[in-house]
């Protein structure tokens, strides 16, 4: 099977990690409510790289935030593995996210008062890793992203591309199964963005992670196993499909 961009996609595992069912998200705008997502259904396989595309305001970032447990749907269910994150309390959802989901933001979101190493360590420490294990994991990932020699500097001493490499290491440090990325190359020049994309996808594939990425870039979408296109709060799938077979 060949994807619409002409590439032959890699084999996609058939067991779903994520399922979202009848997901609707309403936002209050003055006296009116606006439906950003309207009864969205879909699934993402374990180990799959999925790109979510669409025009600004189509609902793609809203969907990603719901998958991350950063927000809750107005109605519907969102399963990560066997866990319905849409039905969890804020506290339980936070704990679940720390252990199971890594997030890469467009604007890096590094803590300026922490060193590179401390920023990376944070996710493992919050997930309850022992200090020695967390330190070793941080060193491995900083080596993998080429920044071990910058471990003790602060983020303001780094370029944008270097900060995003730190953000990738941070997202992976607690060894989550699911990596979510919201326009991770959108704040970078084309050349740097291409290197960051290569790094993120290579590390995710090597470690067997499921990667879901919101993007405006056709180049990014071309690398994905499957593309999901948002249109007016609804979802249209493009490319090879996942056969759902339970979690």
Image (cartoon, rainbow, N blue to C red):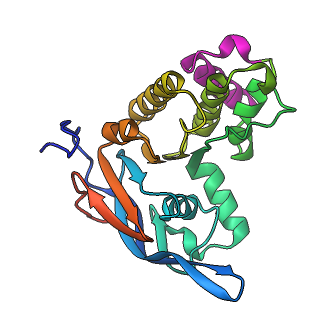
- The reply to whether residue 4 is in sight is yes
The number of callouts visible is 0
Front residue (pair 83, 219) = 219
Q: Which residue is drawn at 48% across and 26% down?
A: 199
| Residue 142 is one of the magenta-drawn residues | yes
Classify residue 15 as left or right of residue 53: left
Q: Is residue 31 above or below residue 5?
A: below
Residue in view at x 26 percent, y 64 percent? 245
Look at the picture and state if 77 lies above or below 146: below
Q: Is the magenta stretch mostly helix, strand or loop?
A: helix
Quadrant for the C terminus in the image = bottom left
Task: Verify whether residue 135 appears in magenta.
Answer: yes
- Which quadrant of the view contains residue 131? top right
Which residue reaches farthest right? Answer: 113
Q: Estimate the x, y position of residue 149 in percent, counting from the top left.
A: 70, 10
Q: Does 21 sit above or below residue 239?
A: below
| Magenta residues, start to end | 131-151
């Amino acid at each position: 099977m060949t994807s619409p961009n002409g590439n032959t996609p890699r084999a996609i595992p058939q067991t779903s990690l994520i399922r979202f069912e009848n997901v609707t998200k309403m936002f209050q705008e003055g006296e009116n409510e606006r439906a950003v997502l309207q009864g969205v259904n879909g699934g993402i396989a374990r180990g799959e790289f999925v790109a979510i595309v669409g025009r600004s305001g189509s609902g793609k970032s809203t969907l990603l935030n719901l998958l991350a447990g950063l927000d809750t749907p107005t109605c519907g269910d969102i399963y990560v593995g066997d866990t319905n994150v849409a039905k969890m309390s804020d506290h339980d959802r936070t704990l679940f996210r720390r252990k199971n989901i890594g997030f890469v933001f467009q604007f890096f979101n590094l803590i300026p008062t922490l060193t590179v190493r401390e920023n990376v360590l944070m996710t493992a420490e919050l997930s309850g890793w022992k200090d020695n294990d967390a330190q070793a994991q941080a060193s491995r990932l900083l080596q993998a992203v080429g920044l071990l020699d910058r471990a003790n500097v602060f983020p303001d001493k780094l370029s944008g591309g270097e900060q995003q490499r730190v953000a990738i290491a941070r997202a992976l440090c607690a060894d989550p199964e699911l990596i979510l990325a919201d326009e991770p190359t959108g704040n970078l020049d084309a050349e740097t963005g291409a290197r960051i994309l290569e790094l993120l996808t290579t590390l995710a594939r090597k470690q067997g992670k499921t990667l879901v990425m919101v993007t405006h870039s056709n180049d990014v979408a071309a690398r994905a196993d499957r593309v999901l296109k948002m249109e007016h709060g609804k979802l249209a799938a493009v490319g090879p499909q996942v056969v759902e077979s339970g979690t």
